[in-house]
Image (cartoon, rainbow, N blue to C red):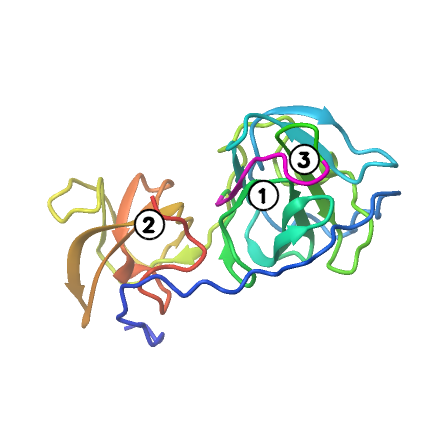
């Protein structure tokens, strides 16, 4: 039996309050990259054409594409900034589990809030041309820590994490973000109890949950839930009852 005191609520977690009136970091010489090895497997931040690379007067890279192009978190972490900002119009900063920070600017729509947990490759915003911008693009920066005032070159930062620029979303291999529990857990082709079983797990298994959706109601081990987690590495869905997390709807995981 699991030790977590799992909530039976089927609702989404309450959104946290977004940060406001924040000013983006000043451009300039790069902060030296941390000596520690890469702490996560990366994901492509956005599809598009690199119109400006990192240099001494430009702390990041600019990836241009159409307005509304999806922007993704390059790795698992916690949102520490999400709000309006002079110069950027709007921006997001994410502190990753290895202590580094990535920064995203000029989007027209933000989809995450401060203190929200995000996974590698999670949709966080949509590309725009807000602030000081001549056209729709993502300005992406990488910082060695939250105290860094200058961005390091994002190209080697991402390369160390398995992502080359320019890139295609879906490239890179996201790390595991949850663990299943129990034995004889069935992975199904869809979030339905009559869907084909594509695999059966014999015990606790580290997994990457890409997204989650509502499906058939499942009652097991004293819990009832209609949320299902999609696990691309297993090729199917598992009831969230068998994901080892106290919340019925997994935080930081987008809806399928």
Q: Where is residue 143 drawn, in percent x and y?
A: 74, 50
Label 1 packing within 10 angstroms: few (<14), some (14-19), many (20+): many
**Where 72 falls versus 76 (above or below)?**
above
Q: Which mark is residue 136?
A: none
- In space, the residues marked 1 and 3 are separated at their CA atoms by 11 Å
Whole-number angstrom distance, CA of label 1 to CA of label 2: 19 Å
Q: Is residue 76 left or right of residue 86?
A: left
Q: Answer whether labels 1 and 3 touch (C-beta < 8 Å).
A: no
**Depth check, front residue: 211 or 65:** 65
Looking at the rendered structure, the secondary structure element under dot 1 is loop
Pointer 1: what residue? 74
Q: Residue at x 16, y 57 (%)?
A: 217
Which residue in the protein does label 3 denote? 159
Q: CA distance from mark 3 to mark 2?
A: 29 Å
Residue 111, percent from left and from top: 49, 49
Residue at left offset 16%, top offset 47%? 192
The mark lying in front, picked from 1 and 3, is: 1
- Of the residues under marks 1 and 3, which one precedes in the sequence? 1
**Image quadrant in which you'd find residue 236:** top left
Q: Is residue 201 visible?
A: no
Q: Which residues are magenta?
A: 122-132
Q: Which residue is mark 2?
A: 212
Residue 192 appears in the picture as rendered: yes
Q: Is residue 61 above or below residue 93?
A: above
Confirm whether the magenta stretch covers residue 128. Answer: yes
């Amino acid at each position: 039996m699991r030790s977590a005191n799992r909530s039976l609520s089927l609702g989404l977690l309450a959104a946290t309050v977004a940060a406001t009136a924040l000013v983006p970091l000043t451009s300039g010489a790069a902060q030296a990259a941390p000596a520690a090895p890469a702490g996560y497997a990366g994901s492509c931040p956005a599809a598009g054409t690199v119109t400006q690379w990192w240099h001494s007067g430009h702390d990041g890279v600019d990836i241009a594409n159409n307005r509304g192009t999806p922007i993704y978190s390059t790795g698992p972490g916690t949102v520490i900034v999400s709000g309006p900002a002079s110069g950027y119009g709007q921006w997001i900063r994410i502190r990753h589990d290895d202590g580094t920070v990535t920064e995203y600017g000029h989007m027209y729509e933000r989809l995450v809030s401060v203190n929200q947990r995000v996974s590698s490759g999670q949709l966080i915003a949509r590309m725009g041309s807000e602030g000081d911008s001549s056209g729709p693009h993502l300005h992406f920066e990488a910082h060695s820590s939250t105290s860094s005032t200058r961005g390091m070159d994002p190209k080697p930062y991402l390369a160390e994490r398995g992502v080359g620029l320019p890139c295609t979303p879906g490239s890179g291999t996201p790390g595991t973000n949850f663990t299943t529990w129990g034995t004889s857990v069935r992975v199904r082709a869809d979030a339905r109890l009559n869907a084909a079983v594509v695999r059966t797990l014999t015990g606790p298994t580290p997994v990457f949950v890409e997204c989650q959706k509502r499906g058939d109601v499942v009652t097991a081990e004293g819990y009832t839930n209609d949320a299902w987690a999609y696990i691309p590495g297993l090729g199917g869905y598992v009831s969230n009852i068998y994901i080892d997390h106290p919340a019925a709807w997994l935080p930081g995981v987008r809806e399928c």
